[in-house]
Image (cartoon, rainbow, N blue to C red):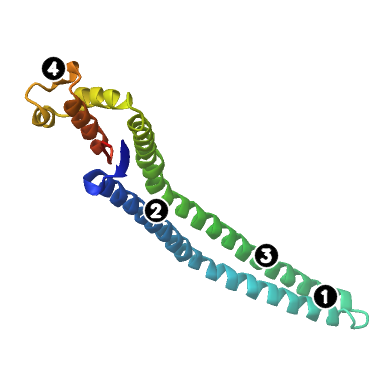
Amino acid sequence: MKIYADRFPTAVRQLLTDLLVVIWVYAAIRAALWLHDLVQKLAVPGQKLEGAGSGLADNLADAGGKVRRVPLVGDELTAPFQRAADAARGLADAGREQQHLVDQLALALAVAVLIFPLGLVLFGWLPLRLRWMRRAGSAAKLAAVPAGRDLLALRALATQPLGRLTRIAPDVAEAWRRGDDNTVDALAALELRHLGLRHKSR
């Protein structure tokens, strides 16, 4: 008995589902990255504030250093420049803090966008895909041994719709109990087709 991929309908349906899942995950990742980049633009004011504050603080500190060299009153004149420089550094720190908050927000929103679509894949599609792989693998192993076709036929009797069973034989259960080779082969083939596989007798 040889196993072949049955391209209609189960295998094609499985392939299309896999492709849709890949597209779904790709689209979700692209959407998350787009949202992350969009939110990151909110950090531009913080960057400008940090740059302006740092530049102003450096200029004031430099001016204060020059004023300090003035004889007698240099130290007293330096104090206002120092306070102004400290205030400018505070502005720069506020800009850095704003950028940090925007980074956290962008990351949190990107993760939030990914949770739902990836959750559907991990907890919805993936378990079903793994279960199908196990069932198809077990069926292929059964079909490879002579006694396996009886088990496949029995499973077909238990799970396949009555309309499909009666198309094999009017009294398919009785034929299976008698061990009719044609009926057993047809039932095994029906079960394999249901899993996206088919078999041919030697």
Instruction: Pick out the residue farthest to the left.
Output: 170
Circle 4 residue: 174
Q: Nearer the viewer, residue 158 or 38?
A: 158
* Amino acid bearing label 4: Glu
Circle 3 residue: 90
Tell me which residue sits at (32%, 39%) in the image.
2
Q: Position of residue 65 (x, y in %)?
A: 84, 78
Q: Position of residue 24 (x, y in %)?
A: 35, 54
Q: Which mark is residue 25?
A: 2
**Could you tell me which quadrant the C terminus lies in?**
top left
Circle 1 residue: 78
Q: Nearer the viewer, residue 88 or 7?
A: 7
Of labels 2 and 4, the one closer to you: 4
Q: Secondary structure at mark 1?
A: helix
Work out whether mark 1 precedes mark 2 in sequence or the reverse, and give the earlier one.
Answer: 2
Tell me which residue sits at (43%, 61%) in the image.
35
Report, in whole angstroms, how far the alpha carbon at label 2 lies from the one at label 4. 49 Å
Work out whether mark 2 precedes mark 4 in sequence or the reverse, and give the earlier one.
Answer: 2
Query: On the rendered structure, is 196 left or right of 161?
Result: right
Q: Nearer the viewer, residue 182 or 17?
A: 182
Work out whether mark 1 precedes mark 3 in sequence or the reverse, and give the earlier one.
Answer: 1
Report, in whole angstroms, how far the alpha carbon at label 4 lies from the one at label 1. 107 Å
Q: Quadrant of residue 142?
A: top left
Work out whether mark 4 precedes mark 1 in sequence or the reverse, and give the earlier one.
Answer: 1
Q: Secondary structure at mark 2?
A: helix
Query: On the rendered structure, is 83 left or right of 13?
Result: right
Q: Position of residue 71 (x, y in %)?
A: 93, 82
